[in-house]
């Protein structure tokens, strides 16, 4: 029997919900109602409630804060959210914080309401079985074998090399492995963005992932989630072999879509092929880890990827790009550094296109830096520490960071040579999507431009576009947009035909204070002084 409380600031709603639920002959017991989140917290503690049905909008403490407080208080039950049609953003937040599901107030019906409560009860049943002490009954023995299988797979998920020799397993482990007979297993590795693109959640993504997977595999036999690193999760799902009609790529795409739609969490997924034995499953998990090497490249950090695509040490096209990089070292004179950097960028594009292991790419770039130190173009008066730059190259964790390192390296060399010209990628050497993004910014700088607008125009996701744009141009999209606006503003003010307020509006910055701050930052003086001062 599960105790249920109802929380809403309107008495008529509390009464309606209580009436809809079929208490008699069910697994549910009415434990009371509350008119606010504060009183609900006290009621939960007093009644030891298992299920909380709560409104999302309340005056004293709303549903979101109630969910947070329940979790902070160690609540082990489930929460069902009631909402109106225009509350979807709040509902998504509630689901992110750990609510089981939501229902619309205006469409509540006894049948669907009871079905949802039964699903919540089934989840609570599973929790109780998991934490129940081990016994020797057949059911508990089966649970123990699943726990043993969980431990085995978790160990292999964290191992560098899979151990497939059956002789190393003890009797209990072999018994656990036998549970896979007649099952088909699917393995997925999910990644969450890091750095400036991360979307940090209040709750661990573990439970969110379980909810998504349970919805996609309603007839699952078991579901395991491992969390070996802060931004990485492993999902293993088994279904009866006779029902093996699931396309893992389609499931990966749906996981990505549902995660962003319902929880606001952007993820990327590497998926394996269906496995029908323990050995095959371990091999697929190992291939997922090996495929992770390609995530060095931004092109492999979005969407879903098959583990059938593994990083290669080299191929013919990559060797051609390598030869061109070495050939660029033979030149000297003006532009020698720029030519080498341009070839280094082309080498990186080739590596990404052909899936070359980052170790091979870094080795060649590091060799090129040694070559630069001996080139005739580097007749510098002061010693140059090429070893420090090689260490930076070896430590680079993405192609974006490697590009920035190469740009910083070239700028240091040019400064040491007294040329004083900071290197920036020419438009012709940029990827097509970045050229399109720049064209869009130049055309629409006077409008209210958002990153989502640019991403939609070039056909890339927002996180991927931001990362790619920074790697290719050395600046963020917003920084480049403001540069375009300030350059246009300077030209307009220099003509003497416009007031500062007019110019601010024309370049898409109607706030005069913000415009003045950006302009002063860009040129070192206020916009009203343009006629009397040359541009910086």
Image (cartoon, rainbow, N blue to C red):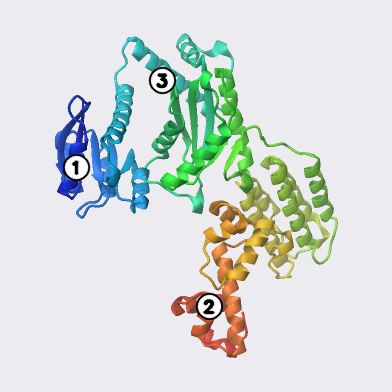
Instruction: Tell me the CA gap for discs 2 and 3.
Output: 63 Å
User: Of helix, strand and loop, which one carries label 3?
Assistant: helix
Q: Residue at x 69, y 41 (%)?
A: 355
User: Of helix, strand and loop, which one carries label 2?
Assistant: helix
* Vertical order, 527 against 344 (above or below): below
Q: Name the mark nearer the viewer: 1 or 3.
A: 1
- Density class for disc 1 (Cα within 10 Å; few <14, some 14-19, many ≥20) is few
Where residue 239 appears, x then y in whole percent?
48, 22
* Residue 329, visible in the rendered structure: no
Question: Which quarter of the figure is the C terminus placed in?
Answer: bottom right
Earlier sequence position, callout 2 versus callout 1:
1
Where residue 109 appears, x then y in whole percent?
27, 38
Earlier sequence position, callout 2 versus callout 3:
3
Q: Quick one: 214 or 478, which is closer to the camera? A: 214
Q: Are marks 1 and 3 in contact (CB under 8 Å)?
A: no
Q: Quadrant of residue 25?
A: top left
User: Of helix, strand and loop, which one carries label 1?
Assistant: helix
Where residue 112 appears, x then y in whole percent?
31, 35
Q: Is residue 250 left or right of residue 226?
A: right
* Residue 299, visible in the rendered structure: yes
Which residue was labeled with disc 1?
16
Which residue was labeled with disc 3?
147
Where residue 449 appears, x then y in whole percent?
53, 66
Question: Which quarter of the figure is the N terminus placed in?
Answer: top left
Instruction: Tell me the CA gap for discs 2 and 1.
Output: 60 Å
Q: Quadrant of residue 316?
A: top right
Earlier sequence position, callout 1 versus callout 3:
1
Which residue was labeled with disc 2?
519
Q: Quadrant of residue 423?
A: bottom right
Q: Is residue 250 left or right of residue 126?
A: right
């Amino acid at each position: 029997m599960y105790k249920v409380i109802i929380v809403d600031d309107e008495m008529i709603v509390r009464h309606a919900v209580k009436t809809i639920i079929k208490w008699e002959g069910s697994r549910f017991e009415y434990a009371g109602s509350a008119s606010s989140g504060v009183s609900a917290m006290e009621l939960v503690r007093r009644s030891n409630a298992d299920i909380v049905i709560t409104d999302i909008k309340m005056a004293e403490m709303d549903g979101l804060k109630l969910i947070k407080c329940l979790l902070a208080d160690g609540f082990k039950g489930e929460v069902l959210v009631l909402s109106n049609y225009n509350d979807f953003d709040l509902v998504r937040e509630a689901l992110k914080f750990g609510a089981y599901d939501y229902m619309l107030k205006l469409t509540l019906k006894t049948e669907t309401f009871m079905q949802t409560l039964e699903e919540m009860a089934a989840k609570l049943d599973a929790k109780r079985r998991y934490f129940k002490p081990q016994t020797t009954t057949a059911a508990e023995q089966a649970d123990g074998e699943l726990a043993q299988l969980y431990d085995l797979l978790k160990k292999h998920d964290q191992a560098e090399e899979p151990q497939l020799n059956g002789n190393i397993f003890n009797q209990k482990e072999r018994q656990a492995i036998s549970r896979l007979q007649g099952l088909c297993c699917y393995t997925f590795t999910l990644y969450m963005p890091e750095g400036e693109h991360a979307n940090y959640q209040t709750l661990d993504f573990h439970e969110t992932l379980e909810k998504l997977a349970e919805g996609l595999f309603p007839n699952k036999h078991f579901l395991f989630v491992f969390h070996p690193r802060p931004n990485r999760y492993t999902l293993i799902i088994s279904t009866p072999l006779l029902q093996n009609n699931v396309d893992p790529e389609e499931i990966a795409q749906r996981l990505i879509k549902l995660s962003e739609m319902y929880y606001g969490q952007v993820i990327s997924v590497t998926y394996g092929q269906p496995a029908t034995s323990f050995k095959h499953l371990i091999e697929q998990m190992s291939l997922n880890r090996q495929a992770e090497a390609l995530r060095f490249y931004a092109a492999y950090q979005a969407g879903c990827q098959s583990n059938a695509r593994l990083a290669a040490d080299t191929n013919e096209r990559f060797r051609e790009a390598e030869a061109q990089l070495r050939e660029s070292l033979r030149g000297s004179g003006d532009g020698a550094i720029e030519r080498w950097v341009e070839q280094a960028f082309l080498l990186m594009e080739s590596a990404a296109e052909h899936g070359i292991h980052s170790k091979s790419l870094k080795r060649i770039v590091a060799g090129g830096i040694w070559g630069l130190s001996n080139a005739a173009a580097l007749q510098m008066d002061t010693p140059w520490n090429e070893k420090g730059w090689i260490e930076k190259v070896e430590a680079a964790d993405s192609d974006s960071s490697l590009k920035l390192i190469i740009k910083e390296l070239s700028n240091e060399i040019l400064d040491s040579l007294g040329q004083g010209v900071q290197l920036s990628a020419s438009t012709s050497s940029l990827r097509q999507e970045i050229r399109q993004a720049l064209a869009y910014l130049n055309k629409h700088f006077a409008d209210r431009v958002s990153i989502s607008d640019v991403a939609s125009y070039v056909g890339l996701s927002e996180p991927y576009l931001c990362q790619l744009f920074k790697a290719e141009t050395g600046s963020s999209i917003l920084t480049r947009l403001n540069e375009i606006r300030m350059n246009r503003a300077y030209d307009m003010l220099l003509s003497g035909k416009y007031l500062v307020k007019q110019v601010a509006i024309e370049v898409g910055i109607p706030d005069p204070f913000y415009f003045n701050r950006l302009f002063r930052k860009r040129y070192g003086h206020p916009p009203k002084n343009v006629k009397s001062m040359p541009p910086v």
